[in-house]
Amino acid sequence: MLGPNRAGPNVTAQLRFTAAICGYSIDLNSAFISGDLYLNQSLLSILIAFSKIVLVLIDTYFPRFSRRNLHQCSQLVVILCFVLLSWLVLVDHHGIGILLINVVGTVFIEFTWDACYLCSVESVPTPLRASSVGSCSLVARIGALFAPMLVFLNSFWAVSVYLAVVLLGTLNLMVSCLWLVETKGISLDSVRLAQVEAEDEADDNGTEGMKRNDERTTMMGKDLEGADEALMKPQ
């Protein structure tokens, strides 16, 4: 049973912030990939849509493939892809290889999005779930605002976007390994019940305390009544 986790929303918000910067930066940078822009975008969209189906099948038929595995493996592939892309750009390579590696890297960035969204939904109690997801989405939108800045820096140094994705992705991977909570297979009701049980325990403790206070008040009242009767008796 997974109880309320204060670190969960903070961690997933940070992961989604990074995923937003990386995803939108690569998407905006696709205009500079060799080939036709619209063909590149169409290819990316088709493969991303197909990858979602594959991800559902993997999640269904491989129960041990956890949320942490999904995020960390995807993030590692993203880092490797864009390290390779940075090297290809530095050696002034032009060819289909840049497009293919971009496509693979973008698909796996989408997988990190999926892992972050699932963890942000599954790691908080039901009464807080909508607020948590909304807050993470807001942080992701703030991250998306920085994407055009990275693309602008690309006009000064051709590998700016790719190196930024590598550095941010490495930080993201470290955060995921250290603090991302595993949530696959939990019942969303159990997350809520864990919170309710804690509240019920607190209520019970409060009720017991009130009972003890009432008993003390009653005993003090009886003692005072006894003292008054003793004073009123004729000497």
Image: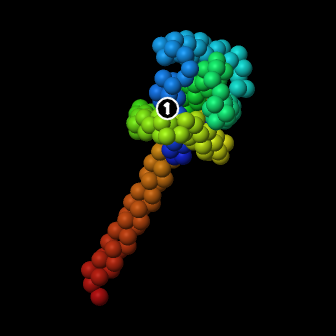
- Left or right: 72 in relation to 52: right
Residue drawn at point x = 48 percent, y = 36 percent = 155
The reply to whether residue 99 is in sight is: yes
Which quarter shows the N terminus? top right
Mark 1: few, some, or many residues within 10 Å (few <14, many ≥20)? many
Where, by quadrant of the figure, is residue 212 drawn? bottom left
Quick one: SS at disc 1?
helix
Q: Toward the viewer: 196 or 219?
A: 196
Residue at the image position 73 percent from the left and 26 percent from the top: 64
Q: Position of residue 215 (x, y in %)?
A: 42, 61
Q: Nearer the viewer, residue 142 or 151?
A: 151
Q: In which quadrant of the rendered image does the C terminus lie? A: bottom left
Name the amino acid type tagged 1.
Answer: Ser
* Residue at the extreme front: 92
Q: Position of residue 162 (x, y in %)?
A: 58, 35
The colour scheme is: rainbow
**Observer-nearest of 4 and 171:** 171
Give the quarter of the image for residue 56: top right
Count of labels in the image: 1
Q: Which residue is mark 1?
A: 25
Name which residue lies at 44% across and 37% down: 152
- Can residue 72 be spotted in the picture? no
Rendered location of residue 98, percent (x, y): 63, 23
Q: Quadrant of residue 49?
A: top right
Q: Residue furthest bottom?
A: 235
Q: Percent x, y for residue 60?
A: 66, 17
Which residue does the image show at 47% across and 45% down from the upper left? 199
